[in-house]
Amino acid sequence: MTSIQSSQPAPAPIRPAPGLVALWLVALILFVVRVTGPSNLMDNDQERPASYIMDAVLHGHWWCQVDWTGDIMSKPPLFTWIGALATLPAGHANLVSLYFPCLVAMILTVTLLFRFGRDPFGWAAGFLAGLMYLAAPSGVKHIALARTDALFAATIALTALLGFRAWTTGKGWPWFWFAAALATLTKGPLGVGLGAMGLLAVLWERFSSARNGIHSPGNQAAHQEPRITPGGRRMWVSQLGGIALFLFLTVGWFGLAYQQGGQAFIDKVIGRELVGHLVSDEHGTFGIGFVKAPLYWLSRFLPWSLLAVVGLWRVVAHPAADGNERRFERFLFCWIVGGLILFSLAKHQRGDLPLPLHPPAALLAGRELARWLPGWEPWKLLRRSLATVCAVLALYTLYLHTVFKQTWEVKESEAVASFARQIAQDSSLPPLLHVDSPYALQFHLNTMNRTVGFQEAAAALKSGDPCAVAVCDSTALAAAMGETPLHYLDAARIAPQKEPIVVVFSNLPE
């Protein structure tokens, strides 16, 4: 019998590489567009992490950094280390190296979303999850923002997904603990709890299997238990080895930082940052987080968070029939819901804090969107997605150079950067002291010097040694000078008719 073959050729399958390379390219282009656009370094408390990087580069404080006021660092140093290592080859401070940890974080996150979302949910879901993560308001913001949030989200995603793989395969627990150490070195011990939150799905799977009663071979295939053997000697050896690695990296750094920073390091990192954010009344009342944390998560990931909510509902109402897919969707559900509960318990709330819950939301949203595009071939999806991204990037570039450029924070940051370039070109300027000037000025001058008080600055100006002072509050400096006149040199202004942001005085005649 002759078989009848269709005249239509089968659609060519797509390999993983093009989708992953496309995500990397989008992340890189978004980074370049943002870094080459107007700067807002003086907004969102970015000056402090920038000063930590320069303290490591210029002063060799790799374990415990201080800012330009002498205050101890507020977060562990992984972001600082990556930024400092990117700064060293250039030899001077620059926005590319300052924001380089953000680029690393974004590329790592979209790689994880594509890699781990592809197998249980399909190629399209993994690819769309990566695009959604980049195209969300949070992704556009954190592609170039000198804060630890993007890197923390990336290390949490690495910890969680490696934990899922270890749960389902019974192997690789040391890698889970290594990733947990990276998360801890980014933002503290909360990383372990957030990274392990999805593993609550282990209990869900076992309860579901016990309730349904698995007797027939068909049910056993559909409800196959993950291969995890808590009593196995090999697994316990792997766990203990991973825990030892985790303690070596985290406690080892903590000891070195204490040796360098002393009791001030303990007071800041443990007292103010860890305990204070949890229980201090300074950050609000207990319970407000149960409203703020979910709203922050929803609003910062719009519109994709709406699809993620549909995905959360589907996990409960219509669980997947395939065992591997069901375990993964329940893992993502526990990661999001458990993480929201954990964030809600803290009194300290900030819009960017739930960012580590955006990767699992992107995976669920990617699966939902992929369900709406069942007839699209992979290459068609790739082409149309990238065409849409190009249009969005063009609009975003236009926004940066029109609306965003007119914000007060950008105008201040750009004025200070321009003023720093002007100062750097003046070879006759005497040594510069900083009183209450923003650190952005020092960053663009490639320095990280401690600020001095008004009396100390006045004493230096009254001395016979050539000296210049950068100050914001000129009135306070004039009061400290008494009858001694100030010699005005120059000032940073947003516009000629505006009040100066920073003024430089010297003890030399004009």
Image (tube, rainbow, N blue to C red):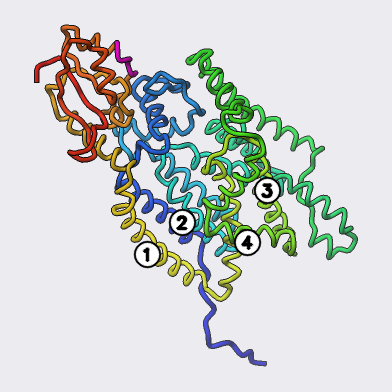
Quarter of the image with the C terminus in it: top left
Q: Distance between the residues labelled 3 and 1?
A: 34 Å
Q: Which residue is drawn at 62% across and 61% down?
A: 121
Chief secondary structure of the magenta span?
loop
Marked residue nearer the N-terminal end (1 or 2): 2
3D distance between C-alphas at marks 2 and 3: 23 Å
Are there few (<14), some (14-19), or many (20+) residues within 10 Å of tag 2?
A: many
Specify the amino acid type for callout 3.
Val
Question: The residue tagged with tag 1: helix, strand or loop?
Answer: helix
Labels 4 and 3: the sequence-earlier one: 4
Which residue corresponds to mark 4?
121
Describe residue 260's horizontal placement relative to residue 392 as left or right: right
Q: Report the front residue among 344 and 6.
A: 344
Q: Name the residue under label 2.
A: 135
Amino acid bearing label 4? Phe
**Farthest residue toward the bottom?**
1
Residues tagged 1 and 2 counted as in contact (Cβ below 8 A): no
Name the quadrant containing residue 114. bottom right
Give amino acid for label 1: Ala
